[in-house]
Image (cartoon, rainbow, N blue to C red):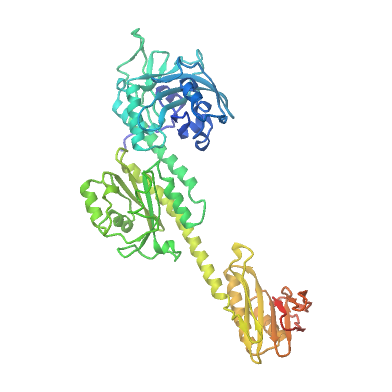
Amino acid sequence: MEPEVPPQRTPSSHDAMTGRVPLAVAVVDTNGLVSHWSSGARRLFGVTRQQAVGCPAGELLPVTGVLDRAEEEGRPGAGPVPDCGLGAELDPPPGGSLLYPAAGRARIDEPGRGRIDVLWWAYPLVGPGSERLLVLAADAGRLGGGGKGEGRDTGTVAPAFALHTDFPGYQELAGRLPEILPSMSVGEATRIVAQVLELGYPVLEFSHRSQVPVTPDWGVPRRDPRHPARSPLGDGEATPAPRTVPRPELDLEYAAVRERLEFLNEVSGRIGTSLDLERTIREVTSAAVPRFTDFAGTHLRAAVLAGEGFPDGPPDVTTVWHRVWVEHNDEPGRWDDTVPVGESIAFPEHTPFFRCMVTGEPVLIPYVSEEASNRISGEFEKRDLRPLITHRSLLIVPLKARDVVLGFMVLMRRPGREPFDDMDRTTGAELAARAGLVLDNARMYTFQENVAETLQDSMLPQVAPRMAGCDIATRYLPGARLGRIGGDWFDSVKLPGSRTALVVGDVMGHGLNSAAMMGQLRTAVLTMATMEMPPSQLLRNLDDLAQRLGEQYLATCLYAVYDPIRSEVQIANAGHIPPVLVRAEDGRAELLTLPTGAPVGVGGVAFETATVRVRPGDRLIL
């Protein structure tokens, strides 16, 4: 009998009462401009990251009172600033400069939503970086209370600060604080987190009696119901603890799964926007950094990248892999010499990369020790991977289609970030599965495109530029990309008596069927031309052949024989566009009037031969 597991649920608005708050996070630099802007800030304020970064913080965030007005107004070169679309009404704290953390409540006008109630926390930052202010904000409407006196059973909700050690599970609370921050380097995040913990953890204060730590909406530290909260004012009155669940770990697990599903959904929407193979690879690789990993490198089998069709059999030590793209958030240039983009390489047998591509299964190394790093790097000749993989977390996932490995992705996380675990391995495998499907579509398109180009090139003749008594120039230019392969053809045939036969035709339709019919008709024309048939007789025989091939085979064709001794051209037309004759003496272009027969394949229509006089220097255009 299977154990009964409490059903997982979608977090309700009441979860906000226990600290689960969708947070907006922004960082302000020394010039008072926004330098980091989270996705939560985009959802709360309705301003995208591209619009926010570089804008004055006072135009976007309801914390004008805590910004250093003197610094903003006296900054050299300061001029008019753009209106970034938000206005706020708030009571600023005393003083123009922020020397200690501050919190407040503001009402702002957001386009499309009207006036909303926002809680905010602001931290002054110090250190070598340019970050000088960290701002957290949340929608007070999601906490179940409106303005003052409008709350439900919770009363007034206000932002405040408290020591993180005041709450159960404070170590996990502090350890997950970096996940609140927008994407930034480990050094920046570590410095900011240390200052936040020192200045006070952001909390929600309910009726000035109960304080609950603010966490992002992936999980919530629960209050212990055995220890009722006390008023920070010291009145000794106990307040009920927030609601608990029987097994909080299930709620955290549910939130972690939801976060990964959101990531996969976002990535799926970003990849596959093009059937270009290399562009698809770049999209897949870039989508994983930095949200899922700090480094991502994608390798494809050289045969796949070259468009040589579907690879046969599993790869081995002789299989050549092409490094198509590398994406990372390390310092620029660090990876360029060791793992350059565009390199072709065969991977050694005793490496995790080889194991992944042979087994077709993800390979996870949660922590690459110095011993493991030395062992892996020692398998490669003339390259030292140790500075890049030591003390990192490594995950290699295969890119497969129809159970054949087309390539693999190397994912790594830097020290200080949570190492890859089994759930990350599952997430990476799902990412690779979706990417493999998109890559296979792009690969098949590339292969079919190469086949079409090869077929068309093989069917177009290699016309000699000089024949007896004439010069010939040709050009094949499809009217559309989809029409590159079809039934169009042209040719020239050397005949006895210094004569030259010229032919141009077009099988109706496009695609391989039209190209196959074109090949048969072209061969027939070449054969009959060498038999020195008159143009009209040649088209009659071609018409009979097309009828025997099938009723659906129709083609237009124009056949001409140029005789330089008689200075004449004999022409017969089967429904094709008439030629143009450009006279050399005055440059006048003349559309030749010819008896136009039906296309070959119709049957029962007579063809006639017309004779056109030409002079030296004239040009005949078919």
Q: Residue furthest left?
A: 371
Q: Is residue 489 left or right of residue 603?
A: left
Q: Residue furthest bottom?
A: 497
Q: Nearer the viewer, residue 598 or 190?
A: 190
Residue 103 shows in this picture:
yes
Q: Residue furthest top?
A: 235
Q: Position of residue 214 (x, y in %)?
A: 39, 24
Q: Is residue 512 left or right of residue 503?
A: left
State whether residue 532 is above or below residue 105.
Answer: below
How many numbered marks does the figure carry? 0
In which quadrant will I find the N terminus? top left
Q: Residue furthest front?
A: 76
In which quadrant will I find the C terminus? bottom right
**Occupied quadrant, residue 354:** bottom left
Q: Is residue 527 left or right of residue 259?
A: right
State whether residue 589 is above or below residue 334.
Answer: below
Q: Position of residue 238 (x, y in %)?
A: 35, 11
Identify the residue shown where x is 48% and y is 54%.
279
Identify the residue shown where x is 51% and y is 56%.
275
Identify the residue shown where x is 34% and y is 24%.
222
Residue 243 shows in this picture:
no
Q: Is residue 268 left or right of residue 569?
A: left
Identify the residue shown where x is 36% and y is 64%.
313
Q: Nearer the viewer, residue 187 or 599?
A: 187
Q: Position of residue 339 (x, y in %)?
A: 34, 54
Q: Position of residue 161 (x, y in %)?
A: 37, 19
Q: Nearer the viewer, residue 310 or 9?
A: 310
